[in-house]
Image (cartoon, rainbow, N blue to C red):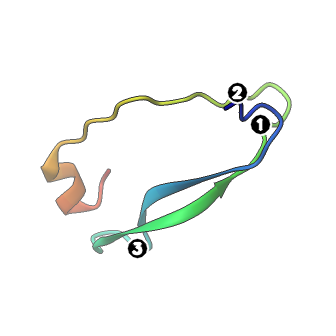
Amino acid sequence: MSTTGKVIRRRAAIFWKPGASFSIEEIEVALPKAKEVRIKEKKSQHFHTKIQSGSL
């Protein structure tokens, strides 16, 4: 399914303030503006220390 030319919805880890716990929320990803691109990330890996400290 192509997402070209469409606003997409994705789940994201959101930190509302430094040092706070994150929450998983659904967000809208807008269309890219001039000189921007949107990439499809297939895999992601983050160190647990970055997540715990809120510096992800």
Residue located beneath label 2 in the image: 37
> What residue sits 77% from the left and 36% below the top?
32
Please, what secondary structure does the residue beneath circle 3 have? loop
Q: Earlier in the sequence, mark 2 or mark 1?
A: 1
Q: Nearer the viewer, mark 2 or mark 3?
A: 2
Tell me residue 37's x, y (percent): 70, 27
- Relative vertical location of residue 41 with respect to residue 49 in this rendering, above or below: above
Task: Work out how far the residue at label 2 is from the one at label 1, CA to CA, in angstroms.
Answer: 6 Å
> What residue sits 86% from the left and 30% below the top?
34
Tell me residue 1's x, y (percent): 67, 32
Please, what secondary structure does the residue beneath circle 1 have? loop
> What residue sits 14% from the left and 50% below the top?
48
Residue with the most extreme front position: 1
Task: Work out how far the residue at label 2 is from the one at label 3, CA to CA, in angstroms.
Answer: 27 Å
Identify the amino acid type marked 1. Answer: Pro
Q: Which mark is residue 32?
A: 1
